[in-house]
């Protein structure tokens, strides 16, 4: 596959619609650039201890709780409500958040935005009792222009109503409508799980989006840059690329608010896991000789491609050795904890890993920022777990809408991270068990999925496309992907306890798949559960020894196949799940680390195997 720089403008075209009752639908374009502070921009992180109140009877809106909560509890933001209160583990209905923030007069000549890092699953926002907007979908941020509702140099009340119920047309979701049970194997953590920000941008026009797409030309690096402004007036500015002892400045002209330019960097220092070098990209916008707006971001110069057997980074084969990784930690739930972020990357390096998959959903920006700096390769995944969990054609169309929304939001937010080399568009899109020949939903599901993948290529033609295929995904769908990714647990979920038999089954299947499709493959999930501290002289299921031996057997098998480009163990660390007879104490214990990051035997084995050897799994 030869990646070409087409469709750079596609990300600029997203329609904004208006919902009844004066609630705007969040515009994905408003999350493209993270809040930044400089001469013309400012921000305030407003996370902390907020007011909180459950609303299971859904009476809060009628009674005007957005005018101020009474008889409230206190809650930490970020953080999932399920782990903060003794009676809310399984609560997923409506709940209210409230905070009060002072906005200074110095922001009065700016446009003010409220950015919510994540709200699972649906959120409605008020400021000072006035309706602002609504967003449907967890795991990604959303933002609103709140300028007209701000009370300057006074306290402003921010109210957010959140609910996280399971529905067949939501992702993840399955239509069971059960409080604690869902088909996806992650606990349905609820609430405001990431930071919340107020930030300002220039009032008369600001940089709304920047897309940086790298390429290589011999020893030179190329950066293709698209800048979108909030207004369509013809403007001018310049871009400065600095790094590796060089400073290159290029003018950029705008037509109808969009400017494009290409910048060549001689003797470029390429980004890679061995040398994760980042160049600084500064965009300045001027009018009549005065600075209007500026924004700085980091970019790595690297390319991603495939041949018939390999994933190619900067034209050279790379083997992905790593894990599926959840954003999950005790007490915080799925809330972002910055010391945990830092420690997780230290542990990845300690283990000798070079990659991870953001299992089942996009994660906090902090993970991608640190991966850029530390040279960890990422498969960025949408929340499309199961994807087609219904054969109702109306619900399939609703799934199509939310999956494409997620795709836009994920790519808009994360497209400039060099660490992300591949988009995973689904984890186990369900097909065969729910559809029989003659069922019209069968053809509809395939066409939706094909359109979904084509949309991803249109939004970002510079990265590889894959999806996680479990045993229920039909083989003919693999023709749509650049890389074939498989989740396989033979020896664990089948051939129970018989490791050699299970590995042989997967080995044979891999050979058949490669012979048919002639594409590089990855095992994106393999391994076994292990209860920390459980041991046996002869390895038995759920012991640390069994987990270590099945991982070793799969890796040995992988080293016999030159078309395998990645082995991602499931999982990096244990994580919380819904209650189940197969989930002791409500945890998936496939992690090589415990939930609080203590190593099991498998972690020590991987450390010894992976450190220093880049050519073997």
Image (spheres, rainbow, N blue to C red):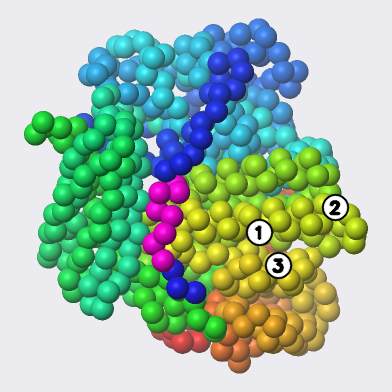
**What residue is pinned by disc 1?**
450
Q: Which residues are magenta?
A: 4-11
What kind of element bears circle 1?
helix
**What residue is pinned by disc 3?**
477
What kind of element bears circle 3?
helix
Residue 509 image offset from top left, x and y in percent: 74, 82
Task: Tell me if 606 is positioned left or right of 367 in this view.
Answer: right
Front residue of this view, candidates 99 and 412: 412
Q: How many marks?
A: 3
Task: Tell me if 414 is positioned left or right of 58 in this view.
Answer: left
Q: Residue at x 12, y 59 (%)?
A: 247
Residue 495 image offset from top left, x and y in percent: 83, 79
Q: Check the picture and name the quadrant holding the C terminus.
A: bottom right
Q: Is residue 6 magenta?
A: yes
Residue 52 shows in the view: no
Q: Is residue 60 above or below residue 143?
A: above
Residue 56 image offset from top left, x and y in percent: 73, 22
Front residue of this view, candidates 391 and 377: 391
Residue furthest left as drawn: 289
Spatial separation of the CA atoms under disc 1 and disc 2 = 16 Å
Q: Main secondary structure of the magenta part?
A: loop
Q: Residue at x 21, y 36 (%)?
A: 235
Marks 3, 2: nearer the viewer: 2
Spatial separation of the CA atoms under disc 1 and disc 3 = 8 Å
1 or 2: tag closer to the N-terminus: 2
- Graded by Cα atoms within 10 Å as few (under 14), some (14 to 19) or many (20 or more), the crowding at tag 3 reads some
Q: Residue at x 63, y 67 (%)?
A: 480
What kind of element bears circle 2?
helix
**What residue is pinned by disc 2?**
440
């Amino acid at each position: 596959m030869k990646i070409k720089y087409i469709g750079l403008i596609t990300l600029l075209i997203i329609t904004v619609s208006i919902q009844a009752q004066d609630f705007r639908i969040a515009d994905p374009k408003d999350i493209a650039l993270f809040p930044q502070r400089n001469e013309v921009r400012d921000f305030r992180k407003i996370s902390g201890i907020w007011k909180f109140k459950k609303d299971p009877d859904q009476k809060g809106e009628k009674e005007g709780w957005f005018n101020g909560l009474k008889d409230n509890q206190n809650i930490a933001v970020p953080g999932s409500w399920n782990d903060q209160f003794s009676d809310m583990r399984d609560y997923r209905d409506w709940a209210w958040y409230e905070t009060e923030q002072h906005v200074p007069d110095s922001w009065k000549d700016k446009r003010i935005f409220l950015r919510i890092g994540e709200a699972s699953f649906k959120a409605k926002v008020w400021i000072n009792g006035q309706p602002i907007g609504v967003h449907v979908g967890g795991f990604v941020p959303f933002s609103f222009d709140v300028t007209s509702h701000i009370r300057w140099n006074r306290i402003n009340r921010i109210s957010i109503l959140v609910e996280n119920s399971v529905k067949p047309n939501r992702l993840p979701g399955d239509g069971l409508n059960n409080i604690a049970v869902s088909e996806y194997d992650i606990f349905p953590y609820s609430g405001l799980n990431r930071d919340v920000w107020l930030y300002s941008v220039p009032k008369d026009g600001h940089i709304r989006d920047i897309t940086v797409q790298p390429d290589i030309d011999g020893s030179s690096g190329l950066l293709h840059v698209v800048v979108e402004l909030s207004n369509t007036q013809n403007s001018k500015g310049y871009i400065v690329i600095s790094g590796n002892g060089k400073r290159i400045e290029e003018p950029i002209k705008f037509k109808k608010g969009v400017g494009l330019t290409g910048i060549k960097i001689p003797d470029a220092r390429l980004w890679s896991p061995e040398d994760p070098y980042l160049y600084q990209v500064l965009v300045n916008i001027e009018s009549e000789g005065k600075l209007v707006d500026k924004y700085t971001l980091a970019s790595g110069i690297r390319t991603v491609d495939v041949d018939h057997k390999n994933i190619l980074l900067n034209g050279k084969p790379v083997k992905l050795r790593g894990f599926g990784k959840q954003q999950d930690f005790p007490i915080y739930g799925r809330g972002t904890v910055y010391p945990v972020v830092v420690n997780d990357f230290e542990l990845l390096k300690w283990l000798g890993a070079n990659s991870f998959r953001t299992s089942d959903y996009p994660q906090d920006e902090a993970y991608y920022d640190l991966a850029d700096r530390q040279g960890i390769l990422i498969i960025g995944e949408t929340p499309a777990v199961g994807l087609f969990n219904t054969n109702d054609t109306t619900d399939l169309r609703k799934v199509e809408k939310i999956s494409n929304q997620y795709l836009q939001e994920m790519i808009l937010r994360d497209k400039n991270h060099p660490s992300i080399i591949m988009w995973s568009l689904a984890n186990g899109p369900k097909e065969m068990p729910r559809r029989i020949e003659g069922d019209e939903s069968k053809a509809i599901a395939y066409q939706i999925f094909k359109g979904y993948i084509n949309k991803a290529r249109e939004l970002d033609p510079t990265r590889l496309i894959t999806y996680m295929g479990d045993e229920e995904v039909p083989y003919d769908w693999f023709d749509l992907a650049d890389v074939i990714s498989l989740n396989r647990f033979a020896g664990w979920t089948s051939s129970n306890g018989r490791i050699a038999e299970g590995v042989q089954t997967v080995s044979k299947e891999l050979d058949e798949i490669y012979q048919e499709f002639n594409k590089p493959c990855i095992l994106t999930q393999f391994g076994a559960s292990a209860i920390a501290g459980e041991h046996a002289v002869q390895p038995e299921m759920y012991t640390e020894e069994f987990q270590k031996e099945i991982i070793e057997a799969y890796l040995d098998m992988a080293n016999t196949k030159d078309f395998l480009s990645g082995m991602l163990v499931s999982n990096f660390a244990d994580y919380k799940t819904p209650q189940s007879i197969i989930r002791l104490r409500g945890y998936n214990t496939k992690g090589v680390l415990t939930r609080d990051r203590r190593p099991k035997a498998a972690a020590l084995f991987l450390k010894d195997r992976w450190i220093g050897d880049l050519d073997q799994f």
